[in-house]
Image: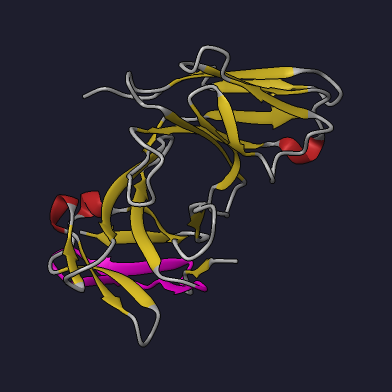
Amino acid sequence: EAEVAQSPRYKITEKSQAVAFWCDPISGHATLYWYRQILGQGPELLVQFQDESVVDDSQLPKDRFSAERLKGVDSTLKIQPAELGDSAMYLCASSLRPTPGEKLFFGSGTQLSVL
Amino acid sequence: AQSVAQPEDQVNVAEGNPLTVKCTYSVSGNPYLFWYVQYPNRGLQFLLKYITGDNLVKGSYGFEAEFNKSQTSFHLKKPSALVSDSALYFCAVRDIGTGFQKLVFGTGTRLLVSP
């Protein structure tokens, strides 16, 4: 079964450094999501793409976070500079269509630790 | 804004017994409701969804959920629990009454099935 690919699996960095996460959605999925999951909480949407366009980035801390999906396929999420509070699991998900009833397919995530 | 509450941090059940994981929601319009499961060090996996129609929804791995509009609940159930069902379960809701249908997750319930 096709999967959403994410890398790296783990990332340890020091505060004020830059980090980047990569996501490759399931082939043909037009909608891509980045979620942040803090330990003990549910995933929170950071940004949603429809093809290469941002549909929702209302919860993305834009002073330090950026996301792009240049060719409407894979995507990169960047944090610069990283802060201690950014330690979390960063999950990428994709869906075939942006319709409300569509199920999401999640990758295994990138576990970020900021020291 | 839509929200989801999972009142139990953890549910303990013996193998072979029925299980229930509770979820209540709040929306301004009509809800689309989902259950996802997360195994250790993995992303979330879709279990089932309610969009419209029958209030009892059947999903993967023998799970089912009952939509109750008057109680604004969508509890997850299984008639006979397996040890392999032990995982973190998330309820999620989309409010289709608003312009943009962001998927909002609850904080999760850890299910522990003992042999």
Q: Which one is in front, A33 or A42?
A: A33
| Vertical order, B59 against A79 (above or below) | below
Locate the N terminus of chain B by quadrant.
bottom right
Question: In the rendering, at what x and y percent does residue B52 appear?
Answer: 25, 66
**Quadrant position of residue A89:** top right
Question: In the rendering, at what x and y percent does residue B8 appear?
Answer: 46, 72
Q: Which one is in front, A97 or B83?
A: A97
Question: In the rendering, at what x and y percent does residue A56 appear?
Answer: 61, 41
Q: Which residues are magenta?
A: B8-28
Residue A115 in sight in this render: no
Q: Which one is in front, B84 or A15?
A: A15
Residue found at the far top of this picture: A71
Count of labels in the image: 0
| Vertical order, A96 against A74 (above or below) | below
Residue B25 in the magenta stretch? The answer is yes
Residue B91 in sight in this render: yes
Instruction: Identify which residue is drawn at 68% across, 30% down.
Output: A113
Question: In the rendering, at what x and y percent does residue B58 appear?
Answer: 15, 61
**Quadrant position of residue A81:** top right
Instruction: Identify which residue is drawn at 28% across, 74% down.
Output: B67
| Vertical order, B46 against A54 (above or below) | below
Residue found at the far front of this picture: B99
Residue B26 in the magenta stretch? The answer is yes
